[in-house]
Image (spheres, rainbow, N blue to C red):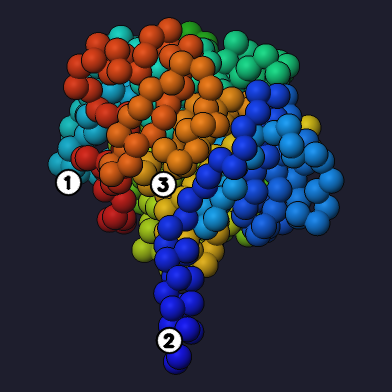
Amino acid sequence: MTLAKSLAAALSWLTLVQATCQVTSTSDSGTTLFKGTVLTSAGALPNARLLVSNGRISYVGRQCGFKADESDATVIECVGSVISPGFINTHEHIEYATVTPLKDIGERADHRHDWRRGLRGHTIRPAPVNGSAVEATAWGELRHLFSGTTSIVGGAMAPGLTRNLDYVAGVGHEIPAPVATWDIFPLNDAAGILRNGDCDYGPNMTTAEKAGKLYRYMAHVGEGVDAEAENEFRCLSSATYDTTPKAGGGGLSTDIIAPNLALIHAPGLTKSDFDLVAARGATIVWSPRSNVFLYGKTLDVKYLLDAGITVALGTDWLPSGSATMAREAVCGFAATKASYGHVLDAKTLWEMMTINAAKVAGFDRHLGSFEVGKLADVVVFAGTPREDAFAQAVFSSGEDVELVMRGGKVLLAAEKIKRAATGACESVVVGHSNKTICVEEELGRSYAEFESKLGGVYPAVLPGVPSGEPTCEPTR
């Protein structure tokens, strides 16, 4: 190889390993133009254009089709980085965001009531909310924002941070009601009721009539790996399974399996159960890390995908799940390969975190993909460029997140593109890099003040593998 060719190769390599963006012009017009590799369901578009106007997508596509005048836009040019819709976390108990993850005591449960209530000889695994649930919720939403998640279904909300898809007041004024309904105990079994062969749960279990009136019903069902977990699905998928009323109320099976239903967790379901889910157009929220940590195994998600079920990813909660969506994706990939020998491609995982998540929560008309008219929830991922652009986003670390935009407003920006951020902003260190964050208006105080007040809780800024992260190694 000649000296010139060697130098060219070296320069090319340097360009590849230094994935980054830069602001080439600024404007106060409210219009932002992104140039670079844009991730879409049709594939990764290199050298593409994404135009954001008034908080919405006004163009997405190849450079050759872009006709708008860019002279009145803030222009962000990205080389090696990838531009993605913001991640959507479809399952999170966000009020537990300040606690330390549970220690692995080597014990795996058969049903969630085993570890919740200490049933059948199992150890109770308490995870009390650390301090104020309101502040913990805001802290958890910040952690998700800083790692590239712009929307959650979390059971609680902090105004103005992530979009809260289960709260009318939390989705943002741009999205009209209705919103998703979230249910931890659809069988009214919080007291630890375990049944097999009948439906004698609590007197106020959900019914087909109640569930059928909801826009989206996202319910924990079959959380366990035993017959009692599978019995929950039987009681919610057949009106004839148990027709004998229970003294005091309840006891009757019902059938809620319909397109508006998202089953959360569901490791207790059989393949025939999932076939029914597919036939009825219901969906699944997959939380592999919690499944593996608590029960030793997770779903054969490839079977679900092959059956045509729409699957979304969710982190569950910090005590036994993942701190970020990227870490949940890492777990889903690893557990699927270890347990079932399947290799999930990065694009499939990305869809579980974007457009499929939007479909499951009922917001695909507004979120989850780059389409003209949809809201501009945009995340840019740097890191080391990969041959698979989707993998660069899906398996990112907090340090790799270069920009987070929600509805056209920049909430986080890397050092080289901080000129794209406006409003009350401050600097925060993420690993070896500096980020500019602009959340004071949403928090009602600076991030530094908020962090100081909480005083040493589980961090919101996570540059790499989170401390104490629950295991994702299947044991069953």
* Residue receiving disc 1: 106
Q: Answer few, some or many: residues within 10 Å of disc 2's Cα (few below 14, many 20 plus, some between 14 and 19).
A: few
Along the polypeptide, which appears first: circle 3 or circle 2?
Answer: 2
Secondary structure beneath dot 2 equals helix
Q: Position of residue 400 (x, y in %)?
A: 41, 47
Determine the secondary structure under disc 1. Answer: loop
Disc marking residue 3: 2
Of marks 1 and 2, the one in the foreground: 2
Q: How far across and how far down the image is residue 42, in percent?
A: 72, 56
Q: Position of residue 290 (x, y in %)?
A: 35, 40
Q: Nearer the viewer, residue 55 or 90?
A: 55
- Residue named by callout 3: 400
The residue depicted at 36 percent of the width and 63 percent of the height is 338
Q: Earlier in the sequence, mark 1 or mark 3?
A: 1
Name the N-terminal-most of marks 1 and 2: 2
Above or below, 328 relative to 181: below
Observer-nearest of 61 and 27:
27
Residue 383 in sight from this viewpoint: yes
**Left or right of residue 47, residue 350 in this image:** left
Rendered-image quadrant of the C terminus = bottom left
Q: Amino acid at mark 1?
A: Gly
Depth check: 170 or 28 in front? 28
Q: Residue at x 31, y 14 (%)?
A: 450
* Nearer to us in this view, 330 or 53: 53
Q: CA distance from mark 3 to mark 2?
A: 33 Å
Rounded to the nearest angstrom, the CA distance separating label 1 from label 3 is 33 Å
Q: Secondary structure at mark 3?
A: helix
